[in-house]
Image (cartoon, coloured by chain):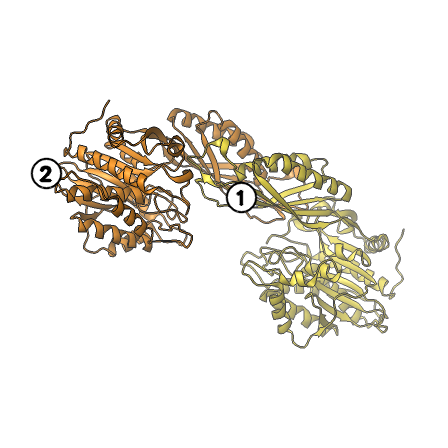
Chain colours: A orange, B yellow
């Protein structure tokens, strides 16, 4: 019996083929959650899975599972994968790499005629990106019981289509697919992903051993002033929402600079009535705040509100907390296994913290979890120019295969810690 | 022969009737330049004018003229009026009052069987407001030769319709109307208007003798940074256009506070890509700067650019000067005539500077010009709640009538200075 080996060529070709679903003229991908493009991608991934003997299923959250049934299916399965939705101007690798690497690793096990006791499930989580339906991570958050299904199904996109309506269309496109209840016990979870930063590239490493994901808080803040004529309203009588915003934004930026790991961003901003000759009455903006330390994030949260109290005057304000995702650490045993595998293959590797959020954050509290990063060129992602080298893609899948073999007991490779 | 008298009742009823063209459910008016609503308003105003024997005409700029022909039509006419377009959420009086007061004053002269040598022209200038097609004052600026006709006709609204296309539709709606060339000599110009501030109301005055219009400069500024991932891009490497904007806006606001007559407004602001988790790459905003002193405005202009040079770093910027309308003084003889008329009628009056821009600014360099203000409730305008009292509306028209009689030589009332 030959040992299982991934086919680098097949994996690469499938990655390129999946990029046809939602392909943009500039080489990018627009395959947003629950879209017709994602339905086409499901069809493609399911066909590849069933060809290898995997059984497709879905759940009320619209997650896609492909199960390689073990000989003891009552045991909690090993789950690996990522997501196949993209940003509206996304690339070929974010999400797709993780799901297809998992499919490739399982296919390699099948082709080697190995029969694990424990089932292996390839997953594509629903709406990781959150661009069409905000916020993202819907599938993994629902799976982990972090959000209510009713609330998520009611979220609407810019055209007024709800998650529930869009999901019904996806499920209707696959009438014969097995439906399973939301959530199930998992033996361990491994998610391969491109790094979306350039630490690996800069250090010449091929495999990133992800130690954890930084915490993230997001906010929607509204500053409300009073509309007035730009030519007549005396300055001292104004309640100018844009000027209040400028003070608030500047003070926040200064206050957040406590260390070089803080990431503070005001990326979205709407002004009302947004007319050149009208003193602006309202500014609505989003804050994205990230740091590895939950304690520091909580402390900065207090400061944000204190700055609003002090600087929004004479305008009033409202602060709405949207996302409060604590930082997490990944399983040290799995991290050791990734390290051992990289060493065995001769891949340079690096321990690093993920600055971006991933579905693995939701899985980490439920089960032993880990992430395998591969480099992406220039650290660019969420962009048509997002690119990973074929040999790095293959390396990530090869390491994942080692982990699946270990987690299903098919091999005895052990972490070296 | 009875002396001419305006009909306060007819003028008020016509103001209310004109408010039906573009009426909003909340009592406001949306009658933007060259719209179907303005075509309906033209039809109404032309019908009232022709009923009194006035002859309608238009010009390549889409201005509307109603001429009461004098016995010596070769003499330069006296022109009075304002505009009949409105803001998208405007009121019943801004513009409409001035045009209908002029129509009422001329109608009173006709009804008194007076036959002036000099013609009197009632005017409705095209697109004073500039909300559909920006910037405003198109009709009076074209009349005064301040802009090129080709440039103005090429301006497009948010739906992609050009001024030229919209104007063709207006002219097609009135196939029999006389077309005259752009611009003609004017003996004097008088524009009645609501104050759009509350100085008259606060001082208990009914007639405002407008001494001039404050100068105005407007700008479009672009701050360009670099798009990046909000979760991964280190703060020190960012070129965050929103943060650069916050610094710039705050420094500008502080630098402009040289005296209490400065009006500085950033009313319009667009962020790109305007996504919550993306470091913003571009901010485009408008500055509206006004002051009675042209010298100070020029000085502040230099400061605005200096602040951009200093504070936009590490982003780059571009500053585009849109409007540079110097302040102007109105004719002292006409101001005296307004004062005398107000005294004769027993109307409390007040000299004041107009903080808002008006078509009269463009006429002032061409001919002796003046503006007659009446109070508007709470100083509110560009708003459905804009309101003027019926007796103030009648007072403004009565004073205008006195000026028309004097300017056409039909009466010998003289200024008292």
Residue B6 shown left or right of residue A309 in the figure? right
Quadrant of residue B264 within the rendered picture: top right
Which of the pair B301/A389 is nearer the observer? A389
Q: Residue at x 68, y 71 (%)?
A: B46
On the rendered image, what quadrant is the N terminus of chain A found in?
A: top left
Q: State the SS at label 1.
A: strand
Q: Quadrant of the C terminus of chain A?
A: top left
Residue B75, visible in the rendered structure: yes
Q: Is residue A126 above or below residue A323?
A: below
**x and y, in percent, of residue B32 in the image:** 61, 60
Q: How many marks?
A: 2
Observer-nearest of A156 and A341: A341
Mark 2 lies on residue: A72
- Residue A319 spot, x, y in % from top left: 46, 36
Toward which corner of the image does residue A109 lie, by quadrant?
A: top left
Viewer-side residue, B290 vs A31:
A31
Residue tagged 1? B282
Of all residues shown, which one is farthest toward the bottom?
Answer: B176
B10 to A80, vertically: above or below = below
Badge 1 density bin: few <14, some 14–19, many ≥20, Cα 10 Å = many
Q: Residue at x 34, y 44 (%)?
A: A93
Task: Sort mark 2 into few (<14), some (14-19) or many (20+) by Cα contacts within 10 Å.
Answer: few
Q: Which mark is residue A299?
A: none
Query: Would residue B293 be seen by someone viewing this image from the given angle?
Result: no
Q: Are marks 1 and 2 on the same chain?
A: no
């Amino acid at each position: 019996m030959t040992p299982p080996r991934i086919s680098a060529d097949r994996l690469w070709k499938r990655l390129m083929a999946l990029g046809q679903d939602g392909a943009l003229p500039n080489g990018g991908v627009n395959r947003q959650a629950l879209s017709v493009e994602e339905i086409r991608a499901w069809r493609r991934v399911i066909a590849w899975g069933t060809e290898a003997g995997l059984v497709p299923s879905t759940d009320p959250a619209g997650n896609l599972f492909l199960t390689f049934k073990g000989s003891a299916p009552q045991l909690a399965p090993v789950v690996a994968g990522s997501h196949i939705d993209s940003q509206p101007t996304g690339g070929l690798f974010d999400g797709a790499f993780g799901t297809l690497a998992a499919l490739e690793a399982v296919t390699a096990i099948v082709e080697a005629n190995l029969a694990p006791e424990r089932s292996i499930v390839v997953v594509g989580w629903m709406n990781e990106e959150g661009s069409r339906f905000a916020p993202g991570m819907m599938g993994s958050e629902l799976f982990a019981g972090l959000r209510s299904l009713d609330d998520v199904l009611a979220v609407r996109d810019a055209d007024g289509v709800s998650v529930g309506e869009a999901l019904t269309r996806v499920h209707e496109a696959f009438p014969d697919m097995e439906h399973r209840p939301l959530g199930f016990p998992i033996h361990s979870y491994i998610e391969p992903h491109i790094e979306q930063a350039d630490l690996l590239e800069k250090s010449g490493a091929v495999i990133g051993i992800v130690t954890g994901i930084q915490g993230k808080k997001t906010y929607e803040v509204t500053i409300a002033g009073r509309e007035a004529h730009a030519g007549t309203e005396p300055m001292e009588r104004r309640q100018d929402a844009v000027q209040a915003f400028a003070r608030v934004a500047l003070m926040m930026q200064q206050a957040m600079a406590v260390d070089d790991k803080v990431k503070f961003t005001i990326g979205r901003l709407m002004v009302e009535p947004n007319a050149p000759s009208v003193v602006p009455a309202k500014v609505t903006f989003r804050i994205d705040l990230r740091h590895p330390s939950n304690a520091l994030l909580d402390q900065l949260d207090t400061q944000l509100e204190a700055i609003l109290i002090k600087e929004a005057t004479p305008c009033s304000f409202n602060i709405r907390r949207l996302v409060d995702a604590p930082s997490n650490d990944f399983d040290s045993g799995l991290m050791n296994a990734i390290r051992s595998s990289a060493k065995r293959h001769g891949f340079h590797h690096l321990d690093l913290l993920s600055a971006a959020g991933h579905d693995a954050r939701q899985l980490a509290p439920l089960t032993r979890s880990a992430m395998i990063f591969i480099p992406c060129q220039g650290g660019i992602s969420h962009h048509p120019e997002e690119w990973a080298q074929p040999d790095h893609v293959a390396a990530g899948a090869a390491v994942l295969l080692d982990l699946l073999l270990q987690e299903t007991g098919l091999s005895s490779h052990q972490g070296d810690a």
